[in-house]
């Protein structure tokens, strides 16, 4: 669990700089330049994520069970993940109504993902991993809502429909094929 915790600290710490030290972040971007800042941020984030994933995998070898979730909650996770994928895609598809209305759809997607996975997983490592992401997403969403919203192009029906279609397709591909392959656990 130590490796997972270290990875979470590095990954979520890097992603919390804007929450905790936005002025310092801005000064570093000004000093280094935007591209070098993004490169350093990416390297640190990838390192943290890799450690968290590897450490989480190691916790499966000797799991500590806190509770045994009812099997039906796996269905709830599947339902929560549909809007989570659509919100994740909404962060990237231009001119969609979801991003225009919500402002920070990726953070909302992380909230849904973490909450859903907390429901259906009862190991200590699951609670720590998904709980950390949920707490981070709540704090990040609050901080993001306090910042001025950037200007975005007027939303269109085409952008919104594309967001939903791509999100649903991504969900299906991930649920039917990639989750078992990448995570080692089938969705159903």
Image: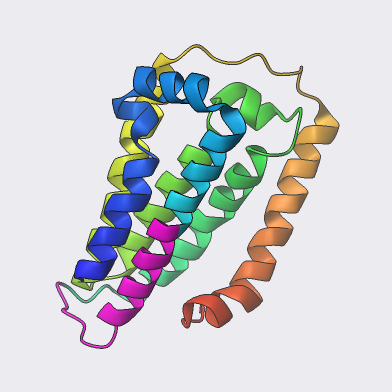
Q: Residue furthest front?
A: 31
Could you tell me residue 105's position as x and y percent? 55, 36
Which is more toward the observer, 51 or 35? 35
Name the residue: 51% across, 64% down.
78
Helix, strand or loop for the magenta stretch, by majority:
helix
Name the residue: 36% across, 66% down.
51
Horizontal side of 177 relative to 118 (left or right) equals right
Highlighted magenta segment, given as a residue range: 47-66
Could you tell me residue 23's position as x and y percent? 37, 17
Magenta-drawn stretch contains 56? yes
Give residue 26's quadrant in the image.
top left
Name the residue: 47% across, 42% down.
41
Could you tell me residue 67's position as x and y percent? 17, 73
In this rendering, is residue 109 above or below 173?
above
Give the position of the N terminus as an image quadrant. bottom left
Name the residue: 44% across, 15% down.
147
Q: Residue furthest bottom?
A: 61
């Amino acid at each position: 669990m130590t490796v997972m915790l270290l990875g979470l600290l590095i990954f979520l710490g890097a992603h919390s700089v804007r929450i905790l030290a936005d002025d310092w972040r801005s000064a570093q971007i000004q000093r280094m330049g935007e591209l070098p800042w993004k490169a350093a941020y990416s390297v640190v984030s990838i390192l943290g994520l890799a450690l968290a994933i590897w450490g989480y995998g190691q916790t499966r070898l000797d799991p500590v069970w806190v509770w045994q979730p009812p099997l039906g909650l796996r269905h709830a996770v599947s339902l929560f993940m549909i809007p989570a994928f659509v919100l994740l895609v909404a962060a990237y598809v231009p001119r969609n109504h979801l991003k225009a209305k919500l402002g920070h759809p990726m953070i909302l997607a992380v909230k849904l993902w973490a909450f859903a996975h907390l429901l259906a997983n009862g190991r200590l490592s699951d609670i720590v991993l998904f709980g950390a992401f949920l707490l981070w997403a709540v704090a990040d969403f609050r901080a993001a809502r306090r910042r001025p919203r950037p200007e975005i192009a007027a939303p269109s029906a085409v952008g919104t429909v594309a967001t939903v279609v791509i999100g649903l397709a991504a969900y299906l591909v991930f649920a039917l094929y990639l989750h078992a392959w990448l995570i080692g656990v089938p969705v159903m």
